[in-house]
Amino acid sequence: MGYIIMRLETSKRMKTMGIFVSASVSRLVIIGLTVLLIGPLSIMHGTVVLAKDSSYIPAAPSGPTAGLTTIDYDYAISTTNPDAHWMFDWGDGTYSDWVSLIGSEDYVVQSHNWSSPGIYNVRVNYRSPYFEEIWSPSLEVNITEPNETDLPNKPAAPLGETAGITNMSYSYSTYATDNNGDNVQYRFDWGDGTVSNWTSLVASGSSSHRAHAWTYAGTYAVKAQARDAYGLRSNWSDPLNVSIEKDSDGDGLSDRTEATLGSNSSDPVDVFGIVIGDVTHYIVTISGGDLVLFYNTTGEQISALGYHNDDILIDDNCDGKWDYIYDVVSGIAPYQERSEEESPFEFFWLWVIIGIIIAVIIIILVLFKKGYIYFYEEYVTEE
Ligand SMILES: [Ca+2]
Ligand SMILES: [Ca+2]
Ligand SMILES: [Ca+2]
Ligand SMILES: [Ca+2]
């Protein structure tokens, strides 16, 4: 068996053609032929370079040959073959995934950081439909420890909700200072095996946030890490423990809460969220019945609803008096209680207006009596 790789050079691009040839019989049998061209015209302008099987060895990755621990460095392989797959060996016992060209790029890039100082041999493994795996030569990378005082300080423990439900997004913030006053950015370890992307760079000491939704119920230790503008990373922050409960039907109430309320934890439309202030409370239909209640998520209290024409009356704090009126069209508004003891000043302005009217009448009467104003009649005599 033998392999032939043909390289087709054009003025701008180089594409790899592969011909898989079986040499086990006297005549050559072409088993597969793949030609990858930008366009048929490329053939006319190109020159074909033939290379025997073993002579094709990928070049060593290109990238920095010296660096500091924890900083991400990019290493690249130049290729235009979309059928090729590449895997980087970082020389520290770890490997990248098999990667290939993305879109119209003509290089494959992977980044890596080393956690301890040393000399590492970075190389790449090449695989295509025509080649098994071939290793490139190594690029020697010398990694040293950064100066401790150049690192950002350990960020504050993340700030945010400590209780929630599955598949609901919650936002967490943190901040850290950098010893050199460099700009910093943050990322969060969500405690479920995932880590957020880095936030944008902000001034040293400024905060940033990222949001996350957990898929499974559990208690998660959320931690933050800072990185300065030069790529130097801090230690991880102290954790914030976040307890996530299962919400099977995704209606915003956990299965446990629905069990307490008597609603159905597998019916997503039996509860209805209403935002009062910044907090979402719920109107809840109790299982199998017409009984509809208000559930205050802050106080975990339940109250009966009232009805006024087409509007719903809500007793937010469960003290027996209506606090809000809810209308599907206009939304929620504070409810104006009409009882006397509710507010003696409610008709204040009405009394002021009545008072002004009475005062004006008195003034007119006084002026009339004093003779400043008077009625007169004119008698017209006929001649
Ligand atoms: Ca720094
Ligand atoms: Ca639910
Ligand atoms: Ca439900
Ligand atoms: Ca009330």
Image (tube, rainbow, N blue to C red):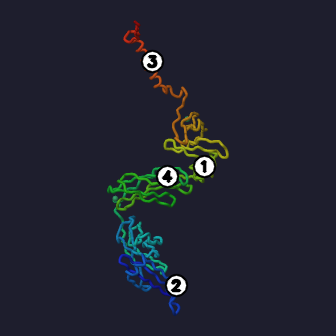
For label 4, the residue is 170
Rendered position, 269 above or below 312: below
In percent of width and height, residue 170 lies at 49, 52
Amino acid type at mark 1: Val
User: Which of the marked residues, 1 or 2, is nearer the chain's N terminus?
Assistant: 2
Element on which disc 4 rests? strand
Residue 233 occupies quadrant: bottom left
Rendered position, 119 above or below 175: below
User: Which of the marked residues, 2 or 3, is nearer the chain's N terminus?
Assistant: 2
User: Which image quarter is the C terminus in?
Assistant: top left
Residue in front for this viewpoint, 138 or 77: 77
Q: Residue at x 58, y 38 (%)?
A: 310
Residue in front for this viewpoint, 40 or 383: 383
In percent of width and height, residue 80 lies at 41, 75
Query: What separation in Å lies between label 3 and label 1 (alpha carbons)?
Result: 58 Å
For label 3, the residue is 358
Label 1 beta carbon less than 8 Å to ligand 3: yes
Q: Do the residues labelled 3 and 1 touch (CB within 8 Å)?
A: no
User: Which of the marked residues, 3 or 1, is nearer the chain's N terminus?
Assistant: 1
Rendered position, 31 above or below 115: below
Q: Are marks 2 and 3 in contact (CB under 8 Å)?
A: no
